[in-house]
Image: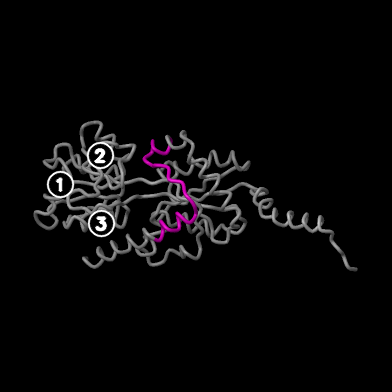
Amino acid sequence: MTIILTRRAALSCAVALAAFPALAQDAWPTEPVHVFVGFPAGSSPDTLARIITEPLAQRLGQPVVVENKPGAGGVIGVQQMLASAGNGHTFGTTINGPLTTAQRLMDDTGYDVGADIAPVTLIATSPLVLAVSADSDIGDLQGFVDAAGAEPEALTYGSVGQGSGAHLTAELFADEAGVSMLHIPFTSYAEVTTSIMGGEIDAGFMAPSAAMPHVEAGNMQMLGITSAEPFPQAPDVPVMAGQAGLPDDFRAELWNAFIAPADTDPAVIERLNTELNEILADPEVQEKLLAIGWKAAPGTPADLEERIATDTEMWGAVIDRVQDSQ
């Protein structure tokens, strides 16, 4: 039997077909959403995830369950997200390391960032500060570079571990400033700050939130910050770029992102990106993020994809230099 559509009926069908992706997007989610975090409950990445998932659940009309899967600098969380994927309701938040440096620092992460992961949006960024004891003879960034350049490894600095963002930032700083420092790895910022104040090490690279309580107590001072512009949590700390021999475009930031398995429906990613960007534009959410040391940084999936590529190249070059010098 031949069916002949009138012009009006044909147009109605075309409109219905064009609206189908939007209808599918509106129907999602149909069950609780799970967000994997590669750090323990109470950690900064976990707190950040909970700050954004609470309003996200309200917007989606479904529970958003934060799944803590700590280990390997956040890599375990990404692995677990991918292992649990398949129903379009599984996602993750992660710091930059598992997406930019882990595949250079580990024998096998178990995933390929480009092939297995779909970017949703950058969530927030955090610079690092160079901090020294309040009793230090060094009072500014130029003085630090001068002291570090007096002889190789004249100064010691602490970070939260070999290959951490703080370690690689310090090595990038040293290379750009033309100095050499001795790295002393620790397991937490608390250990780094205690060792600085106790005179066991000369300096440390750390998140502003780790240094601020000790600065306010008069026990430490911050010499410079690695962001391109002053950071709201530490507005009086000078930007390093263009100072003490560093290039004008010097910048190093930690960041946190929302990601999905690569096979996630593009309409779902678009919906999530829209919801998360609106959440991150909320002043109350921004204040909550700043309170734990993060500055909201919404954007598009393409923005995050570009950031991953740029930082992978930049940190890869730093890792190569560090490994070649060992």
For the residue labelled by badge 1, is the local secondary structure a helix, a strand or a loop?
A: helix
The magenta-colored residue range is 288-309
Residue 7 in view (yes/no): yes
Q: In which quarter of the image is residue 262?
A: bottom right
Q: Position of residue 93 (x, y in %)?
A: 47, 50
Q: Residue at x 74, y 54 (%)?
A: 16
- Amino acid type, residue under disc 2 in the picture: Val
Given contact means CB atoms under 8 Å apart, are the residues at marks 1 and 3 in contact? no
Task: Identify residue for label 2.
Answer: 237
Task: Identify residue for label 3.
Answer: 172
- Alpha-carbon span between mark 1 and mark 3: 16 Å
Asked if the magenta segment contains residue 87, the reply would be no
Q: Position of residue 181 (x, y in %)?
A: 17, 55
- Amino acid type, residue under disc 3 in the picture: Leu
Q: Where is residue 259 in the image (x, y as percent from the top left)?
A: 50, 54
- Bin the neighbour count of mark 3 within 10 Å (Cα to Cα): few under 14, some 14-19, many 20 and up: many
User: Along the polypeptide, which appears first: circle 2 or circle 1?
Assistant: 1
Task: Identify residue for label 1.
Answer: 142
- Alpha-carbon span between mark 2 and mark 1: 14 Å
